[in-house]
Image (tube, rainbow, N blue to C red):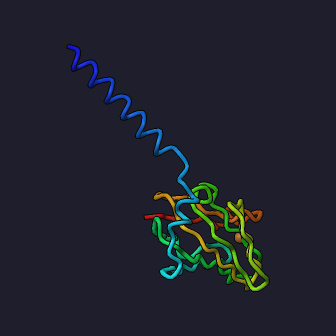
Amino acid sequence: MRPLISSAVVLSLALFTSSGTSAEAPDLAKALAGADWSKVETVTVTMTEYAFSPSPVVLKEGVPTKLVLKNGGKEAHYFVAEQFFKVIATRKIQDSNGEIKAPSFTAVEVYPGKTVEWFLVPAQKGVFDLLCTVKGHAEHGMKGKIEVR
Ligand SMILES: [Cu+2]
């Protein structure tokens, strides 16, 4: 009986460890340190009244990405994806006025007709909700998905 008991204990520990690992936040510093920016891939998201295009926005885990947020509309729009923001490593956000370097963001607003370039590395696979938090926009359908493969 002893071998059975000990293997059961080992199995439960292994399950506990693996579920604990998947629930943990990805190592964003490591994702950024391992990124080769000479192989950056560009993905453009266009925001209009009232949609994100394309949806889903498809990104690749571990691939350095230039996420271009383009406002093709007449109103300001917000790019908000709370869970996605937690699993990406940001190098910088850049527009014609300068650069912002910060570990994480809660929202990115793009003015009408303007573009923001976000240099990031997706560090975890998954499907994440995207929405515009300007009053009334999400209700008018300005919601989308981001899929990290
Ligand atoms: Cu909007």
Quadrant placement of the N terminus: top left
| Percent x, y of residue 137 | 71, 66
> In the rendered view, would you say 132 is above or below 14?
below
Residue 141 point in image, percent of width and height = 63, 66
Farthest residue in the front direction? 33
Which sits in the foreground, 47 or 103? 103
Residue appearing at x 75%, y 86% in the figure? 96
Residue 3 location in percent, x, y?
21, 20
Quadrant for the C terminus, please.
Answer: bottom left
Write the residue at 52% across / 62% down: 31
Query: Where's residue 18, x and y in %?
Result: 40, 40
Q: Which quadrant of the figure shows ligand 1?
A: bottom right
Asked if residue 125 lies left or right of residue 81, the reply is left
Q: Quadrant of residue 87?
A: bottom right
Above or below, 16 relative to 105: above
Residue sitting at 53 percent across and 81 percent down? 42
Q: Nearer the viewer, residue 101 or 45?
A: 101
Residue 4 appears left or right of 84: left
Residue drawn at 66 percent across, 78 percent down? 48
60 vs 137, nearest the viewer:
60
> Total number of numbered labels?
0
